[in-house]
Image (spheres, rainbow, N blue to C red):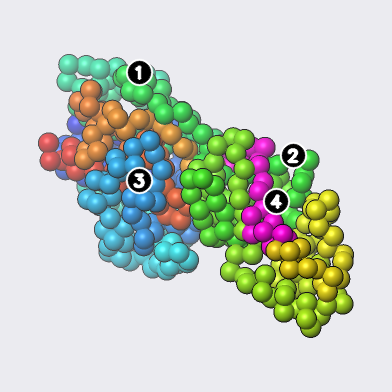
Amino acid sequence: MKTEWHTIIIGAGAAGLFAAPYAAKAGATLVIDHAKKPGEKIRISGGGRCNFTNMYAEPKNFVGQNPHFHKSALARFSQWDFVELVDQAGIAWHEKTLGQLFCDGKSTQIVEMLTDRLAKAGAELALNTSVSAISRTDNGFQLETSQGRLTCKNLIIATGGKSIPKMGATGFAYDIARQFGHQIIETSAGLVPFTFPDGRFAALSGLSLPVRVWNDSASFEEALLFTHRGLSGPAILQISSYWQPGEPVHIDLTHGLNLREALRIQRQTEGRRQLSTELSRHLPGKLVDHLATEWADRFDLTQRLADQSDKALDALMDQLSDWQLTPSGTEGYRTAEVTLGGVSTDGLDSKSMMSKTVPGLYFIGECVDVTGWLGGFNFQWAWASAHAAGRHIAEA
């Protein structure tokens, strides 16, 4: 391996691989990673089919201290720009739900597309390569690596966040950012299941139903999944990115159902039957049984439906449509799909992703304090931020 490069990219994930072909237009470009294979998170994403972007990606689908920072990069490289590359590569795809775009085949097709583009641009890829130190030089940066000393004019940090540490995720990007004087917004697990003590929902594990989940910051209408540890499913993962420890989440179990009116009608025709029996015509029976026990001090679901006054039914409906639960925590980085927080955008240029104080130093992808919703949005941020940095280097 040669030692002098125009651009070195640390991180062979989605953002790093995608930035390389653009940066390579300006000069010799190297992507290095400590992993054995490139794009491992791409490979496991979307159940092995890679939810590579979302048809409806726009700035409102992202979380961060600065709600405007990501607008420039997303506007300059949209979801349709990436779809065009996928089409050119001959990769068949489909919309699964809510604008989520997946490969018809395996997610490795996206990895192959990225590595093919990298190779055709003349960039190089060095795996099984770790970085132990980075320092400034008069002409750029010097890296101490397991392959020896390397120098470069431009350095792109694309090593991601802390989510899924078993795949090698670390806080490397944050350490480098701090070294060069950048602020780090406190990180936490995002798009992650909630946990509850004492196996509260263990008996319901595997049960899923459509709900609306909300707190003071956001609201989502998707599926909820009960687990042995607590709550998961798309609705829960989404709201977790807006949740603060100790805060309750609100769940509408009647979402999409006119349950209040249905029970009043059933009271006229099936009044002799138990309230729990009639509820089970609209909600999963296991869930009704669980609620009958959990809410026993407030509601007796074994009573006849005919014995329920309008006031009593209204009280039950209010509870079903606003079930307030306070998680004890989350499953943490172990299962989190993304990392919230990261390198503060205050120190980065929104058009180029370059440091405002250290010329030639760039941060892209998940390590930056920009986090997307579930459903392909985080990949779109990876593509857009990588494009911004790579194009800036090419055009400098």
Crowd rating for badge 3 (residues with CA inside 10 Å; few <14, some 14–19, many 20+):
many
- Seen from the viewer's position, the closer of residues 6 and 83 is 83
**How far apart are labels 3 and 1 at the CA level?**
23 Å
Q: Which mark is residue 179?
A: 1
Mark 3 sits on what residue?
Answer: 382
Horizontal arrangement in the rendering, residue 24 relative to residue 227 (left or right): left
Looking at the rendered structure, the kind of residue marked 4 is: Thr
Task: Report which quarter residue 334 is drawn in.
Answer: top right
Looking at the rendered structure, the kind of residue marked 1 is: Gln
Looking at the rendering, the stretch of residues picked out in magenta corresponds to 315-335
User: Mark 3 falls on what kind of element?
Assistant: helix
Horizontal arrangement in the rendering, residue 310 relative to residue 238 (left or right): right
Q: Earlier in the sequence, mark 2 or mark 1?
A: 1
**How far apart are labels 4 and 2 at the CA level?**
12 Å
Mark 2 sits on what residue?
Answer: 197
User: Mark 2 falls on what kind of element?
Assistant: helix
User: Mark 4 falls on what kind of element?
Assistant: loop
Q: Earlier in the sequence, mark 3 or mark 1?
A: 1
Residue at x-position 62% and y-position 72%: 258
Q: Spot the residue most to the bottom.
A: 269
